[in-house]
Image: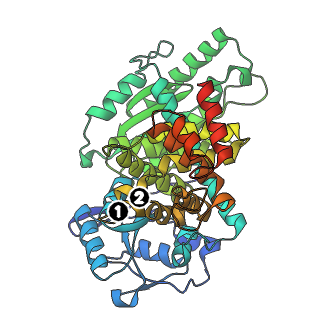
Amino acid sequence: MTASSTDTAVIDGADVVDPLADGSTVAADPVSVQPPSSGLCVWIPAARAPVVTAVEAAGITVVDDPDAASHAIVSTRLARHRIGEYTALARESRLPVIVLVHPGGEMLAVEALRGGGRMAIAEGDIPALRSLGDHTADGGEDPAADEARIDSLLDAFEARLGRSQAASKANVTMVDPVSGLPAVGALQIRLATTSIDPEQRVRIVSMTVPALADTVRVRLGVDAQMLLHRRISTAMRLLCQGVGDLYDIGDGSFVLIAAGLELVPVERLGRAMIETIEAYMPDGHMPLALAVGHAGPECSIDLATLRELAGRAEAAARQEERSAVLGAGELVRPLATATELEVTLKLAELAAERDGAVSRDEVASIAYDIAYRLGFEGRERSLVRFCAAVADIGRVVLDGAAESEAPEVAAVLLSATAGPTVAAVLRAIGAHWDGSGSPEGLRGPEIPVAARIIAVAEALVAGGYAVEPLEAGSDSRFDPTVVRAALEVVRQR
């Protein structure tokens, strides 16, 4: 893959990067050349050509008159104050606001949602855009498409969860004892304390040699593994000398922070690193692989955001069959799920900060354990954990609506991006086994089982793990089978 220079447009006095200026266009995708018309008309204030192209690729008609539109689409590539102004203007016209999010624009999307946006959809997520006309619990997708969407979402969620847990357990080391390079502690301080001058055009490169973290895979003893680590880090240091600051963050991963490193040079550097790493064949058969991801000023000028985006691109490169160099700006579609997930989790963080809010991490953990007790495995358990973690997001975007409407708001927020299965679970968390809850009339086995599990987990956490409320509500408020499983979980803790 060859990268090229990126153009920058100026809108309303703010520099806005053209996501398609590297020569790629959404319309070039064979799936999107002649999309079926959705019959949907949208108004895009301050519309730019790449945004219009992406929307039209989904079979949606763009109109100039808001009175002729059914929705408004506001892009996070606009200046912050314009996003708020256009969101308010669309709401005055009684149009549901869809926030179109670029990688790195997640916080702007959260602000727009809290200002009245209905849902956030990532650039490149054409199926989600196509579903705008029918984002109810029944969905508009066929079952196979819904399954694929959930699988992609849950894979991204579990990967994100794994990274967060690893970071929380990591020994904050300032210098790696094997390579002698600045380590994860030094990188964290750099990210937390350094502000970027936009003129520096900083780029972050994330690199991983998976074999360095897997002694079994390459069949090396501890001493041989350390020697391999030392040699590879020395080669990395020589290649990056004069380019930027290199960090060894452990488990075979390195991070480079460089100013002025443009797209073509970083591609060249990545290829040189791959050639160097592939020269090593510790098992005598297969060369080592290297995954390289990078993000720069074409995506964001915030250092922490660049680190996250570079990591996402590197994770995508790791999925390739061989060594690869991938840039975040080139991965609009593969990054769409990660971008939408990031918006959702930022909303969940805000919801958790409310006074009196139960810990969603605790609820998700308990719900996950209850699901296991009930015989759930793999994807089904992950679905329960995800829904439990994000169930409160409707409470931070209610905009004056009643608290009882929070589940419906959350369901609408995720209906296009997570699919109808997730939306149905979020809507039903307040349902009671005997039919007395919300939504009205939903009762017994009609309630999605994930919603029944989450309702019990919420009650357990809110009650300080007292079992009496669960026993009292069994067969009325709660599914008795789920209650029995929850009691077993409590006894084992």
Marks 2/1: CA–CA distance: 6 Å
Question: From the image, which quarter does the C terminus lie in?
Answer: top right
Residue 110 versus residue 130 in the image, above or below: above
CB atoms at circles 2 and 1 under 8 Å apart? yes
Horizontal arrangement in the rendering, residue 257 relative to residue 159 (left or right): left
Res. 293 in view: no
Q: Position of residue 409 (x, y in %)?
A: 43, 64
- Going 64% across and 57% down the picture, which residue do you hit? 448
In the rendered structure, find residue 206 and report the number of the disc placed on it: none
* The furthest residue to the top: 223
| Quarter-of-image position of residue 284 | top right
- Local crowd at mark 1 within 10 Å, few (<14), some, or many (≥20)? some
In the rendered view, tell whether residue 376 sits above or below residue 184: below
SS under mark 2:
helix
**Residue at 61% of width from left, 80% of height from top?**
35
Q: Residue 266 in the image: x percent, y percent?
A: 46, 44
Q: Please name whichever residue, 354 or 433, is drawn nearer the observer in this view of the structure.
A: 433
User: What residue appears at the point 63 percent right and 59 percent down from the top-left corner?
Assistant: 447
Please state which of residues 227 and 343 is positioned toward the viewer in this rendering: 343
- The amino acid type of the residue labelled 2 equals Gly
Q: Which residue is mark 1?
A: 398
Disc 1, SS = loop
The image shows residue 266, relative to residue 217, as above or below, that is below
Dot 1 amino acid type: Leu
In the figure, 276 relative to 14: above or below? above
Q: Is residue 298 left or right of residue 381?
A: left
Check disc 2 and report the residue beneath it: 394
Q: Residue at x 58, y 62 (%)?
A: 435
